[in-house]
Image (cartoon, helix red, strand yellow):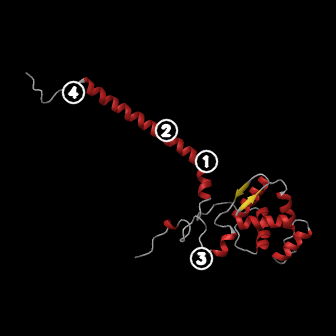
């Protein structure tokens, strides 16, 4: 009589093992497919997200002549020489997209740059040309980091907005800790 202490594997346990193997393969396929879908989706938004991450450097081609002319105008208008060509490009792109008269008005304002010695002289020339409101709007964009159009607005800079530079020695940019953006990526101080 056979001993019942070690029962032989039944067909039901073999079927269970076969089902388990089939289940793992299906799960692996589903995970692989969902992972590939996530990678394909990330491929579209990831470069823009990295470029907008504080502390990251957006790799861009040399600024165009239009961007450099606008940047020179903006530097004279705001009296801030540290303005970024990347942000200037973003302002131009957003302004052109949000408002049809933006580009022609910028072109007229840029023409006033060489004749003005400083910011007050540039504002006076803009007022004489009937473009004072537009010059003030561009100044506002540099300070707030937001281009406001008639129907929509677009944020073009956050940390680089000039309104934070006046208090940067004592107050962090909102939503950033006192150690600055991406502080956790730096080596911690020695103990």
Q: Earlier in the sequence, mark 1 or mark 4?
A: 4
Task: Tell me the tag on residue 170.
Answer: 3
Q: Residue at x 62, y 59 (%)?
A: 52
Label 3 and label 1: CA atoms lie apart by 38 Å
User: Seen from this angle, which residue lies furthest top?
Assistant: 1
Label 4 and label 2: CA atoms lie apart by 35 Å
Tell me, yes or no, whether the two marked residues, 1 and 4, touch with CB atoms within 8 Å: no
Q: How many marks?
A: 4
- Please tell me how crowded label 2 is: few (under 14), some (14-19), or many (20+) other residues with Cα within 10 Å: few
- Please tell me how crowded label 1 is: few (under 14), some (14-19), or many (20+) other residues with Cα within 10 Å: few
Q: Residue at x 78, y 70 (%)?
A: 72
Tell me, yes or no, whether the two marked residues, 3 and 2, touch with CB atoms within 8 Å: no
Q: Earlier in the sequence, mark 1 or mark 2?
A: 2
Residue of label 2: 33
The percent coordinates of residue 100 (x first, y second) are 83, 53
Task: Tell me the tag on residue 135.
Answer: none
Task: Tell me the tag on residue 9.
Answer: 4
Quadrant hosting residue 112 = bottom right
Q: Judge depth for marks 3 and 1 and give the one in front.
A: 3
Q: Is residue 14 visible?
A: yes
Say what secondary structure mark 3 lies in: loop
The percent coordinates of residue 178 (x first, y second) are 54, 71
Tell me, yes or no, whether the two marked residues, 1 and 2, touch with CB atoms within 8 Å: no
Image position of 177 (left or right of 109) = left
Say what secondary structure mark 4 lies in: loop
Q: Earlier in the sequence, mark 3 or mark 1?
A: 1
The percent coordinates of residue 99 (x first, y second) are 81, 54
The percent coordinates of residue 187 (x first, y second) are 46, 70
Quadrant hosting residue 60 = bottom right
Foreground residue among 155 and 49: 155
Q: Earlier in the sequence, mark 3 or mark 2?
A: 2
Residue of label 1: 44
């Amino acid at each position: 009589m056979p001993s019942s202490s070690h029962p032989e594997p039944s067909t039901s346990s073999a079927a269970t093992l076969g089902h388990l193997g089939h289940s793992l393969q299906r799960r692996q396929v589903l995970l692989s497919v969902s992972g590939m879908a996530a990678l394909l989706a990330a491929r579209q938004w990831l470069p823009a997200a990295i470029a907008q991450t504080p502390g990251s450097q957006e790799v861009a081609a040399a600024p165009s002549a239009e961007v450099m002319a606008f940047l020179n105008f903006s530097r004279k208008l705001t009296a801030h020489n540290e303005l970024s060509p990347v942000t200037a490009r973003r302002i131009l792109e957003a302004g052109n997209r949000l408002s049809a008269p933006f580009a022609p008005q910028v072109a007229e304002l840029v023409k006033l740059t060489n004749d003005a010695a400083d910011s007050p002289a540039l504002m006076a020339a803009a007022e004489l040309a009937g473009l004072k409101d537009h010059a003030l709007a561009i100044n506002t964009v540099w300070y707030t980091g937001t281009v406001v159009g008639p129907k929509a607005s677009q944020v073009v800079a956050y940390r680089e907005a000039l309104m934070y530079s006046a208090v940067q020695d004592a107050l962090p940019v909102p939503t950033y800790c006192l150690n600055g953006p991406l502080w956790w990526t730096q080596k911690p101080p020695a103990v």
